[in-house]
Image (cartoon, rainbow, N blue to C red):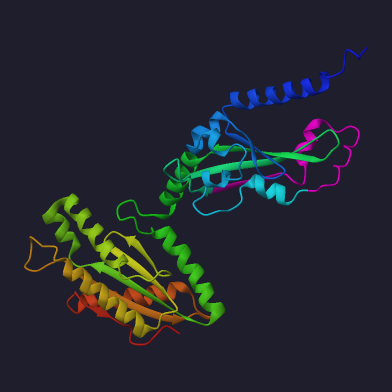
Amino acid sequence: MSSPSTGTAPTALVQDVAFVGQLMESLSVPVFVLDTDARVMIWNRACEQLTGVPAPEVLGTGDHWRSFYEVQRPTLADMVLKGRRDEPRPARPRGLTADADALSPLALSIESWCDMPRAGRRRYLAADASPIFNAQGRLSAVVETLRDLTDEKMAQIALEQLATRDGLTGLANRRCFDDTLHAEWNRALRQMQPLSLLMVDVDNFKAYNDAHGHLGGDECLKRVARAVASEMRANDLVARYGGEEFAVILPNQSLKGAAIVAERIRCRVEQLQLPCRFAAGHVTVSIGAATAIAGPDNHASQLVAIADAALYRAKHLGRNRISLPMTEAA
C-alpha cells in the first residue's frame, strides 16, 4: 500500500508555482521573470500595460528585449544572468534575516531611457533585477521589477532648465553663462588654447520696445536669439546676458575666427528684416569681440571687460557693426 504522501510533493509544487503566478498578476508593479536560459516565465498584466506587449507574445521566448529597445541589447535581468554563479549560494550567517537576500552581489538596479517601440514613446524606467535561488541554493530564475519615472524625470529636466535657461528666449541664462565661462577659461588654461567672447547688443532696443510694445519687444528678442544661436558650433554657448544683450562663448577660437562668426551673426540678424516703426530700416545688432590666451595672471572677467569695451566702440561708431579690441587680451 502506497504512502498517503506519494505524489503530493509535485502537486504542491505546481500549486506553489500557480500561486506565485497569480500573485505576480495581481501586482500593480510591472514584473517579468526569466529562467536560466533567459526565456520569459512570467510577464504580468502591469508589464503588458507598460510595454504594450501582451504576455502570449513573449512567454517562453527570449524576445523580451524587443519590448524596451529598437536594437537588441540586454535587459537588467539578462545582465544578472550573465553574472550568474552556478555554485550554491553561501549559507546565510546566523542572525541575518531574509532581507539579507537583497544584498546579493548579483542584484542590479538602474535608471535609464527606454525606446518602448510598442508603447509608442520613450519612457524613463527604474529597473531592479534580483536572482531567485532554489532550495539547493542554485540560481533558478531572475525577477525584474520596473517603475515608470518619466513624469518625474521630465519635471526634473524642467527644473534644471529653469535654473540654467532664460525663460523668454530659451537660451542659456546669465548663471549658466558665468559657470560655462569659468569652466572654459580653466580648460583653455590647461590646454593653452585661445578663448573668444562676443557681446551682442540689439541696437536702439529701448526705442523699439516703446514703439512696438513689450510683446513686440519680446518677439524681437526671441527672433534675434534664434538668429544668433543658428551660427553656433556644437561646443559654443550663446546666452542671454541681460536685457537686449547676448553673450557668445567660442572655445578654441582665434580673434580672426571670432570676427568671422560675429559678421555672420550681424548679417543674419539684418536679414531678418524686422521693421522699426520709429526709424527707417530694420533691427540690427552691434557686436564686440575679444580673445584671450588664458594664463595664471589674468582672469575671465578681463575677457568680458575687453569684449564690453569693443561693443561700446561699435555703438559709438554708428551701430550695426562689429568691433575688435586694439590688442588681444594678454
**Count of residue discs:** 0
Q: In the rendered view, would you say 279 is above or below 140? A: below
What residue sits 32% from the left and 65% below the top?
229
Front position in the image: 173 or 273: 273
Relative side of 169 to 164, left or right: left
Give the answer, above or below, for where 309 lies relative to 204.
below
Quadrant holding the C terminus = bottom left
Q: Is residue 284 visible?
A: no
Residue located at (84% from left, 38% from top)? 137
Q: Residue furthest right?
A: 1
Magenta stretch containing residue 269, yes or no? no
Residue situated furthest front in the rendering: 1
Spot occupied by residue 27 in the image (x, y as percentages of width and height) = 60, 26
- Image-quadrant location for residue 315: bottom left
Q: What secondary structure is the magenta-colored segment mainly? A: loop
Q: Is residue 17 above or below residue 106?
A: above
**Res. 9 visible in picture:** yes
Q: Could you say where residue 254 lies in the image, as x and y percent from the top left?
A: 40, 83
State left or right for residue 177 relative to residue 29: left
Of residue 174 and residue 116, the one placed in the foreground of this image is 116
Front-lying residue, 232 or 150: 150
Q: Residue furthest bottom?
A: 327
Q: Is residue 80 above or below residue 315?
A: above
Image position, residue 3 (x, y; %): 91, 14
Q: Quadrant of residue 197?
A: bottom left
Q: Quadrant of the N terminus?
A: top right
Residue 325, image x and y in percent? 33, 83
Q: Is residue 225 left or right of residue 216?
A: right
- Residues rendered magenta in the picture: 85-112
The residue nearer to you, when weighing 204 against 132, is 132
